[in-house]
Amino acid sequence: MAKKKKATKKKVAKKKVAKKKVAKKKVAKKKVAKKKVAKKKTGSDQRMHDSLLELIRVTSTVIPDDVQKVILEALKREEKNTNAEYAMNIIKKNIELAKTKSQPMCQDTGTILIYVNHPRGFDQSSFNKILKKAVVKATKLGYLRQNSVDTLTGKNETMNIGAGHPSVHFHEWGKGQVEIKCMLKGGGCENVGAQYDLPNTNLEAGRDLDGVRKVILDAVHKAQGKGCGPGILGITIGGDRGSGFIESKEQLLRKLDDKNSNAELAKLEKDIVETSNKLGIGPMGFGGKTTLLGCKIGVLNRLPASYFVTISYMCWAYRRQGVSLKKDNTIQKWVY
Ligand code: SF4
């Protein structure tokens, strides 16, 4: 009987040891799996960082094809040996030099605007951290000038990182892919943006498309040479004051040669460019035939009590680029 008890005890002890071994193995396996996940995430984060850095570099140094095309057309249009032709030639040379030397095409590398289209489950806070690192690196490498300052002190100590900078806009979409667009918007052209509240009695502008046309042309006239024209307008009709400006900048993400799906707005966009180019303001305000290179108009719902027309003005240094990413966060293709 004593022998039997001893054998049973041994069996139980053995079982316990075996159980412990299994548990240990499980913990070890979990650790390895965790390490693997962490390694994968680090690699994926690094690739996102590198893709963002390249996106910023290209945005700052290479003008998109659709913009280059209209700039060269404008240069051809200007009369020989005029200030306008001279200004357009300087713009052309700046663009070529920036691309060859991989240097910013203007000393003002502007507000950094980032637009992210992403699928459900995208980690926005981790993206923001990676983006900030990429912006600091881009600033150190000279792709961006260090020109975002603390508003109250005027000091510039943060390598383009600070409250509201860069400005990031996330949009969840139905596709499985991540698409990131970057726009660098200079301060000079931002200063000549405007918002009108219709009706405007001074301009005899009512709450209709004719009124909209009047206030847009007023903004172009007021900008004159300021804002480094020839310019491109991004416009919102409607919305509230805040959404109007956000949407007007998103209009600047459209390709210059696209056509508005609303026939009336397509007509208005064309008319605004043609009429502005007859105002004689010209490149940099030197006179000539090219005051605007493009105009893009969007519409938002509004309240019956208000009717805003919001205008974002972009300078000739129309820096916007975009990338679609592969699953591993490397660049699959360029948008513009
Ligand atoms: S408005 Fe544009 S072109 Fe003019 S200084 Fe600023 S970024 Fe440069």
Image: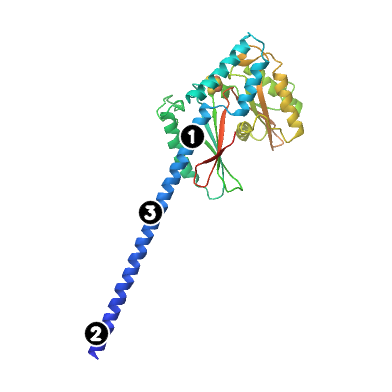
Name the quadrant of the N terminus.
Answer: bottom left
Count how many numbered circles sit on residues in the image. Answer: 3
- Mark 1 touches mark 3? (CB < 8 Å): no
Q: Position of residue 255 (x, y in %)?
A: 64, 32
Name the quadrant of the C terminus.
Answer: top right
Residue neighbourhood size for the residue with mark 1, other residues' Cα within 10 Å, grouped as few (<14), some (14–19), many (≥20)? some
Residue indicated by mark 3: 35
Q: Position of residue 183 (x, y in %)?
A: 55, 31
Helix, strand or loop for disc 3 = helix
Using residue 80 as the reference point, say whether residue 148 is left or right of it: left
Helix, strand or loop for disc 1 = helix
Q: Nearer the viewer, residue 134 or 209?
A: 134
Name the residue furthest front: 100
Q: Earlier in the sequence, mark 1 or mark 3?
A: 3
Residue 225 visible from this viewpoint: no
Q: Amino acid at mark 2?
A: Lys
Q: Image height check: is 282 above or below 195?
A: above
Residue at horizontal 54 percent and vertical 24 percent from the top: 186
Q: Earlier in the sequence, mark 2 or mark 1?
A: 2
Q: Earlier in the sequence, mark 2 or mark 3?
A: 2
Residue indicated by mark 2: 6
- Mark 2 touches mark 1? (CB < 8 Å): no
Residue 179 visible from this viewpoint: yes
Using residue 325 as the reference point, say whether residue 295 is left or right of it: right
**Mark 2 vs ligand 1: CB below 8 Å:** no
* Residue 54: image tag: 1
Distance, label 1 to label 3, CA atoms, is: 28 Å
